[in-house]
Image: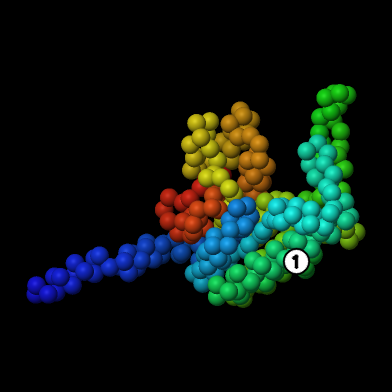
Amino acid sequence: MADDGKKDVALQDDPRVERARILSEALPFMQRYDKRTVVVKYGGHAMGDEALGAEFARDIVMLKQAGLNPIVVHGGGPQIGAMLTRLGIKSEFSGGLRITDKATVEIVEMVLAGSINKQIVAQLNQAGGRAVGLCGKDGNLIVARKVEQKIHDPESNIEKILDLGFVGEPEKINPEILEVIQKSDIIPVIAPIGVSSDGHTYNINADTVAGAIAAAMGAARLLLLTDVKGVLDKQGKLMEALTVEQAKALMKDGTISGGMIPKLETCIESVEGGVEAVVILDGRVRHAVLLELFTEHGAGTLIQK
């Protein structure tokens, strides 16, 4: 009997028991998202860190194995800038925004739909998944239109429209190809390149593409991986949950500013478009996706109706 007692104590200290407990506690969350679509926008520091990239790939493959339908949408701004520099192509800016001319959009497509997309696909496959790379041209997935960017000219005190070249926004999402893929064990990885009805290629913000695809697929969650903890209040404290109305109020009163504004706008549009909830979370945190989906407290700021 004494020996059995020692065995029980030894088992309690065994790290395998703790792993089993964690898996068991994840069960209700796995059941909640069973056969549901989760769109993950992947970018920022996490995408440039080899170790974090490998962990991200394992986490996405685990989602698929657990019965979810993950869709990965990726960015690549720094990689595009590096390639333009390498090729000696100078970017022009207007109003602080990069103008994407024909030469530049060809490089953008090469980097996004080529090297970055296939690198992520390879990481997912190496982690034991079956991934396929796509861009908005495949299956006419993303029909794009040219972005019209308005700025206020202080000299004339009137609004002017900037011509940003081949910078677009989703006009229509045709999800048929993704619906076919969902019936298989394949994980789609999407580069944010769209095509207009007249055949022109457009570079689109990856957050915007992720939001549009999440809405078109009726996703249970859209996860926007960033380089910050989430949405912070004026004291710099993380706000774990917001309603759409609260998010709008925070932008209006100046609590939210800078680059977080377009992210929140994407969140609001996605929720109003049919996504159950959107989460802004720090992609630098190890296993951030699993923490958000499979634990009680999550890992970022959740926005819902």
Could you say which is closer to the camera, residue 60 or residue 285? Answer: 285
The image's colouring method is rainbow
Going by the numbered disc 1, the residue's amino acid type is Gly
Counting from the top left corner in percent of width and height, residue 184 is at 62, 76
Q: Which quarter of the picture shows residue 31? A: bottom left
Could you say which is closer to the camera, residue 268 or residue 10? Answer: 10
Counting from the top left corner in percent of width and height, residue 300 is at 51, 47
On the picture, is 63 further left or further right than 20?
A: right
* Quarter of the image where the C terminus is located: top right
Is residue 136 something one can see in this rendering?
no
* Residue at point 54%, 69% (across, down): 61
Is residue 227 something one can see in this rendering?
yes
- 55 above or below 132? above
- 175 above or below 296? below
Q: How many marks?
A: 1
* Quarter of the image where the N terminus is located: bottom left
Q: Which quarter of the picture shows residue 74? A: bottom right
* Residue at point 54%, 53% (across, down): 284
In the rendered image, which residue does mark 1 sit on?
114
Task: Identify the element where label 1 is drawn.
Answer: helix
Mark 1 neighbour density, 10 Å: few (under 14) some (14–19) many (20 or more): some
* Residue at point 49%, 40% (across, down): 238
* Residue at point 80%, 51% (across, down): 168
Counting from the top left corner in percent of width and height, residue 158 is at 86, 27
